[in-house]
Image (spheres, rainbow, N blue to C red):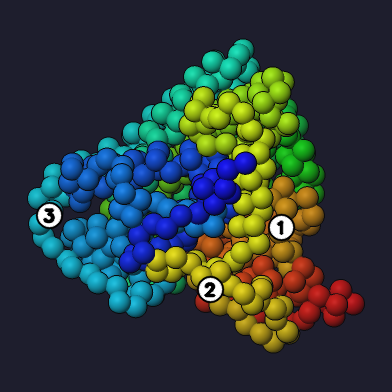
Amino acid sequence: MASTAALDVLDADWDPDAWWTTTNFGEAVPGVLTALNWSFWSELGERAVRRVFHTIGTLDAAELGVPADPADRILGVFHGRIAGKVDFLGRMGDRLPGTTGALVAESLIGELPPGFTSHPTRAHYLTVARGLPPTFVTLPRRLRALDAETARWWAARTAGEPSDLAAAQAQFREGQRWFERTLFHQVLSIFAGVQPVYDRVHALAAKAGDPTLAPRLLAGQGSHAELALVDGLWDLSRGRIDLARFQSEHGFHGPAEGEIASHVWREDPAPVLALVEHYKRVGEAASPAAVLRERAAEREQAKAELLHGLGRAGRPAAELTLRLAATYIPIRGLGKASFLRSLDVARAAARRIGVLLADGGALDSPDDVHHLTADELLGARPSDALQDLVAARRAQRDAHALLSFSSAWKGRPVPSTDGPQAAEAPGAVLTGLGVSPGTVEGLVRVVDDPGFADVEDGEILVARFTDPSWASIMYCSAALVVEVGGALSHAAVVARELGVPCVMGVAGAMTRLTTGDRCRVDGQRGTIEILAGAALAAS
C-alpha cells in the first residue's frame, strides 16, 4: 500500500505566512470533511469566491483562475477542516471604499491578528464603482430566479436514480457545475448585498443613540427560506400536507447538510417525524405565523424609536435603509438553499456510484465512496488496491477528528494537547457575541446528534455549529448557544425572526456547559450564566 502521508488529502501546508479562519466557511462545511466533500468544495469554492470579488471590482481578471501554487489559494484544509485566508479577504477590504483590510480581518477573527498589515488603496475604486452598484441592484431578482430554477432542477434530478455508472458520473458533473454557479451567487449576495445593508442598519441604530435597536430592526421580515421550512413542519404537524409533500420541498435539508456524505431528509425522514412530534405539542397561539406577527410588531416599534432618535433630517435615509434590509437580509437564505440543492444532486449521484462500485466488487461498502476524491469518483482511480486507499483515508480522517484547535491561526494551526475545556461550575459566566436579544432561564442540552434525537421542548441548545436545518428545532427551543458563527450566520438570522435569544462564538461551549445545567442566557449582552450544575438542577 502507498504511504498514507502521500494519500492524506485532508491536510496540507498552504500559505505559511497567512492568517486563516474556520469561522465563516466552517459554518457551511462543518466538522471534519470527507475526502469527497473537500475535493468537491475546494476548486469549485475557490473559483466561486474569486469570481465574486472580480464581479464587484476588487479582483483583477488575471487573478480569476485557481492558482497552481496552493500557497496562493483562498481556501485550504487543515486536519480536515475547511478554512479561508484572512489575508486575501483583508486585501479585498483594502480595495473597497468605506472599509479596510484591518476592519475585515477584525470582523472575521474578532480581533486584529498580531502583525496583520493593511494597505488601503483607491486603485480599484473605479472598477468597484462599475461593478458593485449594478450587482447590488440586481441581486434580489437574480437570487429569486435562481432559487426557483434550482428547485425545479433538484426535484427532477432526485426523483429517480441514474441507470448506470456513466449516467451517475454525468449527474455528479452536473451537480458540480450547478454548485459553482449557486455558491457564487450565495457568496455574492453576502458581500455585495447582505453585509453592507446589515452594517448600515447597525450604524443607524448607533447614530440614533441606541445600538440595541439593530436586532429588532433586522427581525420580523418573515420571508426567509429557513422560515418556509418551519412553516412546512408546522403544516405537516397539523395534517395540512403529507410527508411526501414536505420532502419534495425541503428534503435537501438534514443533519450536517453541507457534508456530501450525510443523509438528508429526502433519504431519511426519521428526524422529520421526530420534529413533527415537537411541533404537535405547540399550541395554535404560538404558531409560526403568530410568532412572526409579534416580531413584525416589535420591528415597527423599533423603527419608530429609530426615526425619533434620528430626527427629521435623518428619516428619509433611514426609511430607505430599512426597506433595503427587508429585501436583502432574507436573500442570504435563498442562495444557501440553492447551493444545498446542488450539493444534494451530487450527493445522490455519489450514492449511486458507491452502490455500483460496491456491487462490482471495487468497494466493500457503498459508503466507502466518500473516501475517494471527486476525480477518483469520476474515473481517475487506481485499478487495484482501492480498498487500501479507502482504509488509509478513513484512518486519517478519524485521526483528524481527535484533534482540536482555535478558529483562527497563522500558517498552520497548533492542535491542543490539553483536551477539551473542563465543565464550568455554577456562577461561571461564558461570553460570546449576542446576536438575538432576550433573556431566558432554562436547562441546557448539549447537542452532539445533528438529528436532534434527544432534544426536548424549551431547552437551551448548545451546538458546535449550525446549518439551516437547525431552524426546525430552534422554533421549539428556549435559546441557542453556538461555538462557531457570527451575527449573519443562518442561526442568528432565524433566531431574530423567531425571537429566540442566541449567542454565537462561545469558545468551548460544548464542554464548558453540560446537559442539565440550569443557565441564564442573555442574547443582547452575549452572556451565559450557569445558575446550577446538572445534578442540582435535576433535584
Pointers 2 and 1 in contact (C-beta within 8 Å): no
The tally of labels here is 3
In the rendered structure, the answer to whether residue 457 lies left or right of residue 137 reads right
Residue 433 picture location, percent across and down: 50, 71
Front tag of 2 and 1 = 1
Q: Is residue 154 visible?
A: yes
The tag earlier along the polypeptide, 1 or 3, is: 3
Q: Which residue is found at the position 33% from the left and 55% from the top?
A: 71
Residue matched to label 1: 448
The foreground one among 47 and 256 is 47
Q: Is residue 321 above or below residue 354?
A: below
Residue matched to label 3: 125
Please tell me whether mark 3 sits on a helix, a strand or a loop. helix
Q: Which residue is found at the position 35% from the left and 41% from the top?
A: 48
The tag earlier along the polypeptide, 2 or 1, is: 2
**Extreme-bottom residue of the structure:** 427
Residue matched to label 2: 432
> Which quarter of the picture shows residue 261?
top right
The foreground one among 517 and 297 is 517
Q: Is residue 323 visible?
A: no
Q: Is residue 328 above or below residue 308?
A: above
Task: Characterize the local packing of mark 3: few (<14), some (14-19) or many (20 or more) Cα atoms within 10 angstroms.
Answer: some
Check disc 2 and give the amino acid type. Gly
Please tell me whether mark 1 sits on a helix, a strand or a loop. loop
Q: CA distance from mark 2 to mark 1?
A: 20 Å
